[in-house]
Image (cartoon, grey):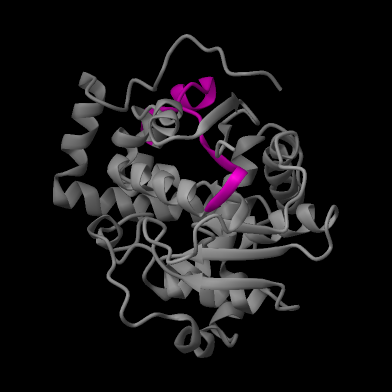
Amino acid sequence: MTDTAIAKEKPDWAGEDWLSRLVNRLIQTKPLYALMKQQARRVLIKTAEKNGVPWRQTVKELEQSPAKQYFQDIADPHLDYPDYYQVPFHAYNEGNLCWQAAFEAAPATAAMALRVWKTEPLTPEMAQARLRNSFLDVLEQHLPQEVNEALDIGCSVGISTFALLDRLQSKNPTVKVTGLDLSPHMLAVAKVQDKHQAVQWCHGKAETTGFTDDRFDLITLQFVLHELPNQATREIFQECRRILRPGGCLAIVDNNPKSPVIQGLPPALFVLMKSTEPWSDEYYTFDVESTLKEVGFDYRTTVASDPRHRTIIAHKPL
C-alpha cells in the first residue's frame, strides 16, 4: 500500500464536466429516474445472488427477527432529521428511514465487497473480511498508544462496527465501542446482530452527537462521506474534533475519486450509481484532506487501501 499518486483527480462523470451534466439531466427526468432506480435494484440483487449472497433469504430472516421490537427502544422520537437525509437514495424513496433499506443493507454491503475484487474467486465472507481488513490494517499503523473508547459514525447495521470491535479487542479486551447512526431502522438490525450486546447503539446526528468533549480515542467514518453534502461533512469533522481526546485518531474509508477502477466505470454503471447517490458530485470533487486541516486536524496520510477505496487518517493535535 502506498499513498495515492494518480494523475486524474476525479471521474469525468462527476462535477461540472459535460458528461456529468448530461447524466444529471437524465436523472432529473422523473420517468427515467424511476426506471434507473428500478434497474439499479434489479442489477444489484441479481448480481449479488449470482455470486453467493443470500439476499432474499437474509431479508426474510430479518423480517422475522425482533428488529421491529428493538426499534421502539432505540429510536429518538424527537430527533430532527437533516434535509439531506430525507431525500431518496440507494434506490429507496425513504432513503435509510425504512425497513426495506435496513433489511437489505447487509446483502448490499456483501455485494459491494465482492465488486472490489470481482476477478478473484472470493466468497462473500472472504471479500467482506478483506475489505474491512484493508482499512483496519492502515488504521492500526496510526492508532494512539491506548484505545479505550471508540465511535463508529454512520454505523448502519453494524458490519463496520463489529469489524472494528474485533480488531480493537485483540489489543484491549475491555475497549468500549459505540455505533452512531441516523436511521433507527438500521440500528435495530444492528442490535439483532449484536448477540453479546458488545456495542452501545445510539440514534443521533453526527453533526451534533451530544457526547462530551474529549471522550473518544478513535472515531471512524466507514463508507459514509459519499452519502453526505460537503457542508454536512465539514460539520461532522468539527464535531469529531470536539469529541476526540487530544492525540485521538479520526479514520475515514470511502470511495477513492482517483481510483482507475472508479474512473473507468462503464457508462451504464456510473449512471445507475449516480441515480442512487444524490451527493456524488459533491463527494467526488471535495477536498477531504484540506477540510480536515481547516477544521484543526493534524492530517497524516491518504492511502489507496484497495482498488476502489482510500483510507484517510488524521489526529487531533495534542
- Taking the view exactly as shown, the residue that stands out farthest to the front is 318
**Closer-to-camera residue (288/298):** 298
Magenta range: 244-268
Q: Which percent across, then down, holds residue 10? A: 39, 21
Indicate the quadrant containing the C terminus: top left, top right, bottom left or bottom right: top right
**Closer-to-camera residue (181/237):** 237
In this image, 311 relative to 256: left or right? Answer: right
Q: Which percent across, then down, holds residue 146? A: 76, 49
Q: Is 76 covered by the magenta stretch? A: no
Q: Is residue 52 above or below residue 144?
A: below
Task: Residue at 39%, 80% (x, y): give it.
Answer: 76
Q: Is residue 118 above or below residue 28?
A: above
Q: How many numbered markers are drawn?
A: 0
- Taking the view exactly as shown, the residue that stands out farthest to the top is 7
Task: Residue at 78%, 58% (x, y): give it.
Answer: 166
Q: Is 254 covered by the magenta stretch? A: yes
Q: Is residue 255 above or below residue 12?
A: below
Task: Residue at 68%, 31% (x, y): give it.
Answer: 119
Q: Which percent across, then down, holds residue 238? A: 40, 46
Indicate the quadrant containing the N terminus: top left, top right, bottom left or bottom right: top right
Task: Residue at 33%, 38% (x, y): give it.
Answer: 280
Q: Which percent across, then down, holds residue 305? A: 65, 30
In this image, 268 relative to 106: left or right? Answer: left
Quadrant in which residue 191 is drawn? bottom right
**Closer-to-camera residue (54/316):** 316
Quadrant in which residue 61 is drawn? bottom right
